[in-house]
Amino acid sequence: MSEAQLIKPDLGYVKEVIAAGGESLKKCYQCATCSVVCDVTGDAQPFPRKEMVWAQWGLKSRLINDADVWLCHQCADCTAKCPRDAKPGEVLGAIRRTAYRAHAVPAFMGTLFSDIKFLPVVFAIPIVILAAVIMLNNQPQAGSHLFPIFGGQGFMPEGPIVFSKMMPITTGVDLTFLTVALLAVLSAFASLKGFWGRLEAQVPASVPRKGFVPSMMEFVGELISHASFKKCTVNAGRTLAHLLVFYGFVGAFIATNIVLVYEWGTKFGIFHELETPLAFSGAGLLPKFFGNIGGLAIVFGALLMIANRMSKSEDSPASGYDWVFLGAIFLVGATGMLTEILRLMDNAALAYPMYFVHLVFVFYVIAFLPFSKLAHLLYRPIAIIHAKNVGRDTAAPTAKAA
Amino acid sequence: MEKKIGVYICSGCGIGESLNVEKLAAVAQRKGGQVVKTHPCFCGEEGNALLANDVASEGVNTVVIAACSARAMTDAFRIDVPILERVNLREHVAWSHEPNDEHTQQLAEDYLIMGIVRVQKTSPPEPNIQDISKVVLVVGGGLTGISAALDAAEAGSEVILIEKSPRLGGWLAGAWKDLPSTAPYRDLETPQVAEKARLVQANAKIRVITGASIEKIAGAPGLFDATVKTEAGEETIRVGAIVLATGSRPYDATKLAHLGFGSSPDVITAADLEAMAVKGEIHRPSDRKKAKSVLFIQCAGSRDEAHLPYCSATCCATSLKQAMYIRERNPEAEVTIVYRDMRTPGQGEFFYQRAQEDPGIFLTKGVVTGVTAAGGKIQVAAKDTLLGPDVKFEADLVVLATGMVPTTVDEPILNLAYRQGPALPTLKYGFPDSHFICFPYETQRTGIYAAGTVRAPMDSAAVVQDAAGAALKAIQCLHLTAQGKAVHPRVGDDSFPDFFLNRCTQCKRCTEECPFGTLDEDEKGTPKPNPTRCRRCGVCMGACPERIISFKNYSIDMIASMIKAVDVSDDEDVPTFLGLICENDAYPALDMAGLARIKYSPHIRFIPLRCLGGTNLVWMAEAMSKGLEGVLLIGCKHGENYQCHFVKGSELCSIRLSKVQETLNRLQLESGRIRMVQLAINEFDQLPGIVDQFIEDVKEFGPNPFRGM
């Protein structure tokens, strides 16, 4: 018999999960209805019941290193069936929030995202950095009301609206966003490396491994179709919303990268120089196509998400950060589309500030990805790949099809 | 009294469509009915008037109503005559047998004749009326006793309240907080017992005697003489009825070494913790430091065959309560509760939810496997938890949630001067309870009612209700006793067993077997009746080998005569059987079978008995010699979860039958001709199967050789 494990309840962590949106967790009386109704849990050591107990006891290290909370897509079947109104789906969401905060590298970024009171700081960072970049790239001009901080002189370019005049591609956009993207990647890598190690350490070496790459390929297949998501019966509408937002970002990502490739290609003489704003033809056609379709998908997907959330605001109280996040997703798309529309309307007075706001939200999405709710983009794949690697993911569609 | 027998045969409710009522009327006339009438609805206005008129102007004083079940239409047939008998032609005949069938008609005729024989063998009872005390004695001055005293006084009774300790209040007087007793059942309450104790002291109808013990209680309901001993000396007080409210004590924790008790001063009981909370800070007794982490072990010695096999119903809620006030006093404190099953019956579920809401109360199912003191902390090991296969916890203070032991386990308390002993008989686990569903608050001693935790484990809200129930039972007993009437279940019965002592052989069977300890003995062993203790079940009548015990309206001769009156057919293919059935469960079960129109053999004649415990073996002999093929006895369930209205009547019957069957074997009669079955009232659907199977089985033996002799 193995040595008994010492259980130390952690009141602080219980309160942290409660604050992160798990206020109902203490209502659970461990009947396991949630684990029974869950369509994605495995049969051995099923979730979410065990997570509910751990959360009541504040067993932080177990929960933040628990792959199962990431297998949950928060379909809320369990929340609907819970006889005690303990909302296991919400609690798992709250646990995930505490998990990516706990894994944040550097740690202070986790703290910054742990409390809504730090929100001004979170948005001050992109505002200050982007404003500085714009100011460094331009001379202040009289009569311009963008950042009119130098005796009434601002940074709004004159003439036809060309955003690269305000925010040059290389020394502005690339410098800023490639830098923060790199930092985000480094941060994510550091967090995930530790996370993966701890996940794998929990499963004895004697358990056969499928291998990282085959597991990942299987995951990618499911990701493309959103197969697991479709198992949700209570929240059927969520699949479409998530698909829209997901593919919207994919579109925006593709558009950005085409432009990036073109831009750097021209520097090496491979392509002809692209003229901004891009035309809806020629070399601009593809990025325009992906960008616009993606932007629209994000806007409508985010609206759908917000509507879903509002329609059941009673039994699904999103924490403040969830609303901020949903707002940011919507606004990153909406400000992008508005920027384009304002440009086409030739309203420079509004187009430039809108572009600036858009950049702030783009910054938020990219730079804070490992710390915001978008972190699920990192942790969920890792956890699912781990589950597939060790054979935990019996929830694959074929296994539960009956 | 010169009887004038009136027989009234109803043809309503399908009786007339199934039976030849005119033929029945002719039979009644032939067999002794002096006035015989039929009517399609005797319970209606016209039929009722017919009856009333015969009683008023025709001088009918003995009435046989052959209509529906004796349990139906009781108000319509409440006729003021000395002797009234109901013959059940509806449920037991018309509704459960083939209509217009010769066997059905024969069954009805037999029942009618048996009814007439019954009234012929009945004389009006003479109630035993004595000058009784109507004082209610309440023993125990805790919340239960205080509540019972207040309730009885409020209902107009004089009350004497006896408490062992120098002051009133009991356990709850030493409690810091109490469980919620009112909606929304979420918040801790301050114990209400002190306020109630003040009300008792101020009540002119209640005399409080503290520092007292009971040396002896002699007598019977209405006539109890309680000898009460105090520092001032002994005093004998005449009281009418008794409420036993002496409560319980916590299980002896010194027997719980396996849960760490005794291994460290920091392992305490729930009672210790409560006392600690009253005195001040929750601390560790070892170093008097504030306890930051407290762990409760539920079912400490409870639901454990080696200790208390039962659940005490309140320990879970009590631990939740204590956890809540520990957290209220010190928001930094962490409280862990390891339970086997969280049991918070009744409204306790709301309280459980409230306690759960507190993030500092940690709950898990689990079985504690060891408690050890280590490094200034107590380590508690547990298995089968929700947190992993084998886990351990650390706490500053460990609290054992011990169960309740009724005070009657330690001493008889009432010290009854009864032939059957000084203590109240117990049902299970030492609780002096009777079957609670059917007989709330009753003990197996008439006029003595148990309430509160001496009767069964319960919380303070429940003991208050219990106290009211027992107080009302005591008052009810006094009022019935004053009229010479029986208490539950034969409420209002004013008959009483007569003992023809000239022929008594002092065998003591009656004094031993009476389920209620009614009979005392003189030096020689002759029974000394205590009429007000009697429940009129007739167990003594069944026990007596000399057949010298009988009631005016219920006797061995009466039942034997009814058996004799059964018509045994000359046709060998038409067998006749006798059924002796308990009137409390089997009779209504037969009624229900009739209501459900379930059919069974028409060849069995049922005679209801007050209790199967009144079965006298002479009836078996009578039935056999008469040529009846067999006797089926249907009684209540006995054993641990008995349903017998007289506690052990059906069990006594089965013991007696085991002896008669030996006799049958000697007579070369198959012992299988007599069978006893146990039937619960709700098992009516099994009756046809039981009856038909019995008849089938007895057929195997061939006809009764005594038939036609």
Image: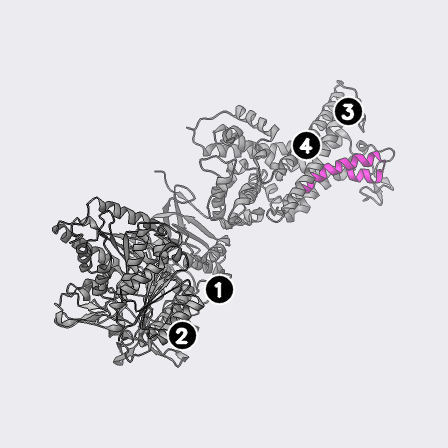
> What's the distance in space between the residues labelled 4 and 3, CA to CA?
18 Å
Marks 4 and 3 in Cβ contact (< 8 Å): no
> What's the distance in space between the residues labelled 4 and 1, CA to CA?
57 Å
- Residue B182's disc is 1
Instruction: Locate residue B83 relative to residue A8 in the image: left or right.
Output: left
The amino acid on which the numbered mark 2 sits, given as a three-letter code, is: Leu
Residue nearest the viewer, comparing B446 with B406: B446
- Mark 4 and mark 2 on one chain: no
Q: Chain of mark 2?
A: B
The amino acid on which the numbered mark 4 sits, given as a three-letter code, is: Phe
Q: Is residue B184 above or below residue B380?
A: below
Q: Quadrant of residue A360?
A: top right
The residue range painted magenta reads: A326-354
Q: Which element is circle 1 on?
A: loop
Residue where numbered disc 4 is placed: A249
- Was residue A287 drawn as part of the magenta stretch in this picture? no
The amino acid on which the numbered mark 3 sits, given as a three-letter code, is: Leu
Residue where numbered disc 2 is placed: B150
> What's the distance in space between the residues labelled 3 and 2, CA to CA?
93 Å
Q: Is residue B321 above or below residue A136?
A: below
- Mark 1 and mark 3 on one chain: no
Q: Nearer the viewer, mark 4 or mark 2?
A: 2
Residue where numbered disc 3 is placed: A285
The amino acid on which the numbered mark 1 sits, given as a three-letter code, is: Thr
Q: Which element is circle 4 on?
A: helix
Q: Nearer the viewer, mark 4 or mark 1?
A: 1
Q: Chain of mark 1?
A: B
